[in-house]
Amino acid sequence: MNVFFPALRDGSPAPALRFGDRALSYRQLAAVAGPIAERIAGRTRVAVWATPTLETSVAVVAAMLAGVPAVPVNPKIGESELAHIVTDSAPALVLAEPGAALPDALDVLPRLDIGIDIEEASAAAGEPGGSGAADTSGTGEGPPDLPYEPGDEAPALIVYTSGTTGPPKGVVLPRRALAHTLDALEDAWQWTASDVLVHALPLFHVHGLILGILGPLRRGGSVRHLGRFTTEGVTRELSGDGTMLFGVPTMYHRLAVEAGRDPALAKALAGARLLVSGSAALPLTDHERLTAASGRRVVERYGMTETLMNTSVRADGPSATGTVGVPLPGVYLRLVDDAGEAVEGNDGETVGEIQVRGPNLFVEYLNRPDATAAAFDGGWFRTGDMAIRDAGGNYRIVGRKATDLIKSGGYKIGAGEIENALLAHPAVAEAAVTGEPDEDLGERIVAWIVVESGPGSVPPPSAEDLADHVARQLAPHKRPRVVHFLDALPRNDMGKILKRRLSS
């Protein structure tokens, strides 16, 4: 029998999930999720209204137990995008927390409310409780009766991902890919059942849902979800029994700024076993600030919806700041040039597109055999991400092939290194770099800047100041030719800069 959550099957009394003051032990989680799994068993697919709640977590666990593919839906999604997802995935029903107001495209579907009463869950699990605290006395009456789970190739999740053109594509992720990624991270991060993960990531995406919820549950550990990110929440949980923190660069930027002036936060970060950043590159300036304040290094990893996790800086390995580390166990990466030929050697300079193969890959784009075929070069998945590889085998992402690789004056220039140089300027709070057509250079480098503000800020720089700063840090041909000053950069829910919205 395939068992995705051993601690759930064993009826462990250990704490599993906590959102605010509401918590479930593994035994209580099984008592709640088991009956839901029985009710939805045999359905083709279910949509999950993926709010950052205990209910969303239980709904996805129930779908995993039932072997029914779940389609997590962003609660902030637009009407046209949601209509496409519902039409494309054709869910048989929607799982949501009681009282949640659903948009029309979901409201017309049959609905199953995921109501969770902690006292009832405790009683059903044979545990005392009701206060929201997980019982650890082991007084339950044997492991829970849960349904048999399907094979490794059965689809577990269908996660919709948007490209630069066209409607979002449904990425069909099999149980095999989820299990492989989480088990490979167990090795890379020394992840154990004693770890308590703290995060505030959304639950409709790979980072927050698969790594942040299913990851701890597969390990038999626990997760403390903050509901929404605050530096106070991070301080509180890491000052308690939290051992790991997951976040995106916008979160770590706030932590870096606050840790420099808040001794309690700096101490909490220093006490964490592992700090992990993902979903976008963490600027070197924030790495340096966090290390200076806490003495801890932040580990970066690299993944995509279609591939889950590909690489990571290892928790037990040498420092590799500014890189996304080495391939995870069982995952194979290569760099290819414009002609599709493999880039040999680790010179730390030659840029190529990352291609991936391994058991971490998705099965297909739902209803899109054309897009699925186009995404592969033989057995290798074309990521569209450009990188270099250093002598230690670490990969450093320089940007997306479509938006971050700038061909200017005969040079191939990664937007990421220019962004890091700009962020090293004391007056720059945020930076993005793009390319735009130029008759002479082919493409010219364009910088989009948000300046620092507030007490202690230095005077704002001119466009020429910033161009000269980059030329001194890197090389003259990498200087921005155009600089735009903005109040804020456009970002998605994961903190990624939406460069397609930046145009002169």
Image (cartoon, helix red, strand yellow):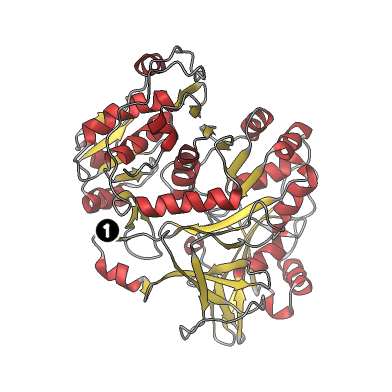
Residue 295 seen in the current view? yes
Query: Which quadrant is home to the N terminus?
Result: top left
| Corner quadrant of residue 3 | top left
Neighbor class of circle 1 (other Cα within 10 Å; few <14, some 14-19, many 20+) is: some
376 relative position to 480: left or right? left
Provide the secondary structure element on which disc 1 rests.
Answer: loop
Where is residue 139? Give x, y as percent.
45, 15
Looking at numbered disc 1 in the image, what kind of residue is underneath it? Answer: Leu
The residue sitting at 19% across, 34% down in the picture is: 110
Tell me if residue 352 comes above or below residue 320 in the rendering: below
**Total marks drawn?**
1
Residue 381 occupies quadrant: bottom left
- Image coords of residue 377 (percent x, y): 38, 76
Q: Is residue 126 above or below residue 156?
A: above
The residue sitting at 68% across, 76% down in the picture is: 478
Image position, residue 368 (x, y; %): 26, 64
- Residue at x 61%, y 76% (from the top left corner): 413
Does 147 appear above or below 215?
A: above
For label 1, the residue is 366
Residue 113 in sight from this viewpoint: no
- Please indicate whether residue 26 sits to the left or right of residue 256 in the image: left
**Residue 263 placed where, x, y %?**
79, 34
Q: Specify whether 324 is left or right of 208.
A: right
